[in-house]
C-alpha cells in the first residue's frame, strides 16, 4: 500500500499528491492544459475522482442522461468501470494503491472529448491494473459532463430484437436465428422448471475480452473476463461471438434479490448445473475434468472448496462444479422449492439452509457431495 502522501516528479510528468481525501491525479505532458477546454475537462475529471466515484448516486460531474439508465438499483454506479475498480474497496483505498495517471484528453468530435487514465502500482513492482476511457461532453447548459464510453462505442452496433432478448452485435458478428431460437428455448425451459417470471434482457455479443472491456470503459483490464451478467441492468455479455450462452442466461433469469447475492457456490453452481461452467462445456464434461484436477490437491474437503482454498489457478471450475452437485442434489430432494431456498440464502446461513433441505448435518451433506465429486467410475 502506498503512503497517503505521494510526491512523484520527472521531466515528462506533472506532480500528483494524495493527501487524505484529496485525489490529485498525474497528467502526462500530452494533456495540454494551456487549451481552455482541456483545462476545463481536467478539472472536471479531478472533481469526479474526489466525488465518491465508488458510490451510486446522481453525481454532479456526470451527464444527467445516464441517471435513469444506470441508477435503477442501489448497487449500480454511473461509471461502468466503477463496478470493477471499487469492488471490495472504497475509492480512497483504491487510489492509495492505484494512483490515477491521465494519459490523454483528446477531442474526437465537436464538444466531445476522450479521457484515458492509467491505474498502476508503483511499488514494489509496477503492475498495470487498467486503462480506463471516459467521455466528456458539453451539455445544454454549456458545461462538460462525464459519460460512459459505451454510449459512443456502440452507436453503430447492430441491434436485433428476438422475442424477449435484444441482441447488440459488435461489428463483424452476424445474427443467427437458429442460435437465437436455442437461446429462447433454453430460457423458457429454465423459467418453466423453476416457475420464474423473468423480464426481457439485452445481450451484448463481442469477439474478445478487449471489445467486452470497452463496454465498461476499459481500454485495457487485467481481469480478462469472457462472460458476465448484470442483473440490475438486465444485461448479458459474451466474448465468444455466441448468441446462446446458457450459463449467463441462468444468472439473468433468476430473480433479483432484495439485498446482496446468493452464496457464490449457489449462484455459480446453479448456472453450472443448468448451463455448464462456461461457454460450450456441459456440467457433465466439467465434472470429469474437475475429478481429474482434484488429484493434484491434498486434504480436499467440501469446506475448503467452498472457501476456495482448493482451486485451479486459471479458473473457478472446482467451486462451480461442486456447487452444481449441491444444487442438483437439492433439486432431487426438494424440487424447485429447495432451489429457491438455496437462492435466497446467504453465506451466513447457507449451512443451516442445507441442513433444512437435506434433513442431515452440514458435514454429512458435504461428505455426500465429495463422494460424488471424487468418484472416478462413470
Image (cartoon, rainbow, N blue to C red):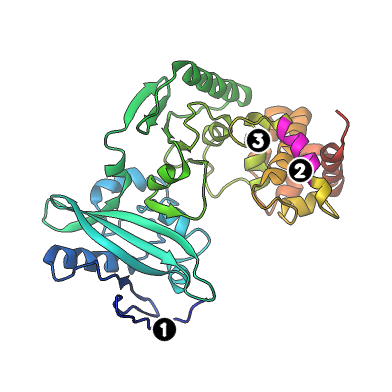
User: Whole-percent x and y of residue 313?
Assistant: 67, 53
Residue bearing the label numbered 3 = 272
Image quarter of residue 142: bottom left
Q: Is residue 57 visible?
A: no
Our reading of the magenta stretch's main secondary structure is helix
Identify the secondary structure beneath mark 2. helix
| Few, some or many residues within 10 Å of mark 3 (<14, 14–19, 20+) | many
Where are the magenta residues, as a range?
Answer: 285-293
Tag 3 near tag 1, CB within 8 Å? no
Residue bearing the label numbered 2 = 354
User: 334 or 226: nearer the eye?
Assistant: 226
Give whichever of discs 3 and 2 has the lower sequence position: 3
Identify the secondary structure beneath mark 3. helix
Residue bearing the label numbered 1 = 5
Q: CA distance from mark 3 to mark 2?
A: 18 Å
Quadrant in which the C terminus is drawn: top right
Q: Nearer the viewer, mark 3 or mark 2?
A: 3
Image quarter of residue 15: bottom left
User: Whole-percent x and y of residue 149?
Assistant: 31, 48
Give whichever of discs 1 and 2 has the lower sequence position: 1
Q: Is residue 189 magenta?
A: no
User: Whole-percent x and y of residue 165?
Assistant: 43, 26
Q: Residue at x 36, y 54 (%)?
A: 79
Amino acid at each position: 500500500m502506498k503512503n497517503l502522501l505521494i510526491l512523484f516528479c520527472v521531466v515528462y510528468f506533472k506532480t500528483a499528491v494524495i493527501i487524505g481525501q484529496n485525489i490529485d491525479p498525474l497528467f502526462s505532458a500530452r494533456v495540454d492544459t494551456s487549451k481552455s477546454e482541456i483545462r476545463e475537462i481536467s478539472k472536471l475529471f479531478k472533481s469526479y475522482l474526489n466525488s465518491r466515484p465508488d458510490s451510486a448516486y446522481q453525481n454532479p460531474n456526470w451527464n444527467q442522461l445516464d441517471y435513469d439508465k444506470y441508477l435503477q438499483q442501489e448497487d449500480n454506479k454511473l461509471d461502468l468501470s466503477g463496478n470493477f475498480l471499487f469492488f471490495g474497496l472504497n475509492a480512497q483505498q483504491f487510489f492509495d494503491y492505484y494512483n490515477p495517471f491521465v494519459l490523454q484528453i483528446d477531442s474526437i468530435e465537436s464538444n466531445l472529448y476522450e479521457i484515458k487514465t492509467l491505474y498502476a502500482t508503483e511499488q514494489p513492482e509496477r503492475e498495470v491494473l487498467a486503462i480506463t476511457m471516459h467521455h466528456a461532453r458539453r451539455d445544454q447548459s454549456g458545461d462538460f459532463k462525464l459519460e460512459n464510453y459505451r454510449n459512443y462505442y456502440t452507436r453503430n452496433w447492430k441491434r436485433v430484437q428476438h422475442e424477449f432478448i435484444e441482441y447488440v452485435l459488435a461489428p463483424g458478428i452476424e445474427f443467427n436465428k437458429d442460435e437465437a431460437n436455442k437461446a429462447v428455448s433454453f430460457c423458457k425451459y429454465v423459467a418453466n422448471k423453476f416457475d420464474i417470471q423473468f423480464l426481457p434482457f439485452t445481450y451484448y455479443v463481442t469477439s474478445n475480452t478487449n471489445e467486452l472491456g470497452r463496454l465498461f470503459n476499459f481500454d485495457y483490464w487485467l481481469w480478462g473476463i469472457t462472460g458476465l451478467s448484470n442483473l440490475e441492468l438486465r444485461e448479458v455479455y459474451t466474448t465468444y461471438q455466441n448468441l446462446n450462452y446458457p450459463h449467463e442466461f441462468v444468472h439473468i433469469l433468476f430473480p433479483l434479490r432484495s439485498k446482496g447475492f446468493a452464496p457464490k457456490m449457489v449462484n455459480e453452481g446453479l448456472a453450472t448445473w443448468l448451463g455448464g461452467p462456461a461457454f460450450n462445456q456441459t456440467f457433465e464434461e466439467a465434472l470429469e475434468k474437475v475429478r481429474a484436477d482434484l488429484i493434484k490437491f491434498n486434504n480436499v474437503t467440501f469446506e475448503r472448496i467452498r472457501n476456495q482454498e482448493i482451486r485451479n489457478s486459471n479458473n473457478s471450475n472446482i467451486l462451480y462444479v461442486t456447487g452444481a452437485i449441491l444444487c442438483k442434489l437439492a433439486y432431487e430432494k426438494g424440487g424447485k422449492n429447495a432451489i429457491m431456498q438455496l437462492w435466497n440464502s446467504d453465506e451466513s446461513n447457507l449451512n443451516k439452509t442445507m441442513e433444512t433441505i437435506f434433513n442431515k448435518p452440514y458435514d454429512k451433506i458435504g461428505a455426500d457431495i465429495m463422494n460424488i465429486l471424487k468418484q472416478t467410475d462413470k
